Image (cartoon, grey):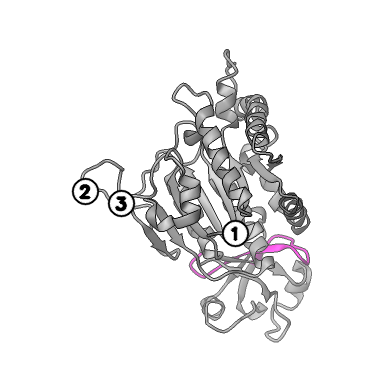
Amino acid sequence: MYKSITVKIGSNVLTRPDRKLDLERISHITDQIATLHKQGIKVILVSSGAVASGRGMVTHLPKKDPVSERQLLSSVGQIKLVSTYASLFEAHGITCAQVLVTKEDFRTREHYLNMKNCLTTLLEHKIVPIINENDAVSVTALMFTDNDELAGLVATMMNTEAYFILSNVDGIYTGNPGDEGVQLIKEITGTTTDLSGFITTKKSNFGRGGMLTKGRVAQNTAAAGIAVHIANGTRPNILTDLARNSEKVSHTRFVPGSPRPAFKKWIACSADFTNWEVHINKGASDALHSKKATSLLLAGVTSMHGDFKKGDLLRIIDHEKRLIGIGKAQYDRQKADEHLADPKYKPLVHYDYLYLFP
């Protein structure tokens, strides 16, 4: 049985067809989390449903742009969503806490560690954190793709043993569920499996993500050493069954890879927060991908973009213009330019501060 779990619950699980919260299902999910909590399992809950809840409360929605509409609905709905959870957990003698985050909270190492410390403190005091994106202040460019992405980053940051993604289907199929000959994929290993060929790009009715996003997030999270399970959140006792004996549950499991060092986890989470780039040649790319731990030397750099400073994160682009990794600069752009022709100068990115995408 897992000792720590990040649980993400989608809007389609928490919402009825009339766009109002499904209080009966939320109550059942809360009961399951309470059961796991009382068994000593640490549970972090990432819950969608604020916008859907707001839609059920705002009767005359003004015509606004999508971001303004989302801000309005989430501001109204988040209060009801969290108060519902609080009342249900209180019946079990459990305290919960609301944690609203934005993508900016993963931008710097300081913000990242501050958020990690907050969640660690809550768990140490046996409080269940309930996390959601702060839609009221998020803008389009700084939004998470959806809460699947947010929960994956949280699971990686907190190094939970497992990450449960609850949707309204049993998992990932070889085509559209229900079509003739389509089968559930029970297990996926590694990040090389291309899921786009048989996953529909259709998004959920009430959320903004889809199964393709879930698959991508699941692969990246599993690559960090966390077991990922995509399952049907509308099925009775799904959480407790997954935690106790997942092999007997019809769902999709992503096999975890090797764990990463803590600093590299932050670097992996920060890929979207830097515009500085270094382009490298084929020799440097081959060296970085070799079995030997290799740092990025200036000798392998073909061009640099941006006035980066020491400590900034750099996007590493290979000779085929592919983003292959993220690294922390050991010195600034000026010094890099000065020593670009010196093949023996110290690495621009040391191996300890380099993350290569699987």
Q: Residue furthest left?
A: 180
Q: In x, y percent, where is residue 69?
A: 60, 25
Q: Which residue is mark 1?
A: 3
Q: Earlier in the sequence, mark 2 or mark 1?
A: 1
Q: Residue 250 got which mark? A: none
Q: Main secondary structure of the magenta part?
A: loop
Q: Residue furthest top?
A: 60
Q: Which residue is mark 2?
A: 181
For the question of whether residue 231 can be seen, the reply is yes
Label 2: few (<14), some or many (≥20) within 10 Å?
Answer: few
Residue for point 57% across, 46% down: 35
Range covered by the magenta-colored residues: 304-321
Disc 3 from disc 1: Cα separation: 31 Å
Q: Which residue is mark 3?
A: 174
Three-letter code, disc 1: Lys
**Residue 157 found in image quarter:** bottom right
Task: From the viewer's side, name the closer residue of 25 and 80.
Answer: 25
Do callouts 3 and 1 mark residues in contact (Cβ within 8 Å)?
A: no
Label 3: few (<14), some or many (≥20) within 10 Å?
Answer: some
Q: Residue furthest bottom?
A: 344
For the question of whether residue 195 can be seen, the reply is no
Residue for point 45% across, 59% down: 254
Task: From the viewer's side, name the closer residue of 220 and 256.
Answer: 256
Residue for point 40% across, 58% down: 247
Q: Earlier in the sequence, mark 2 or mark 3?
A: 3
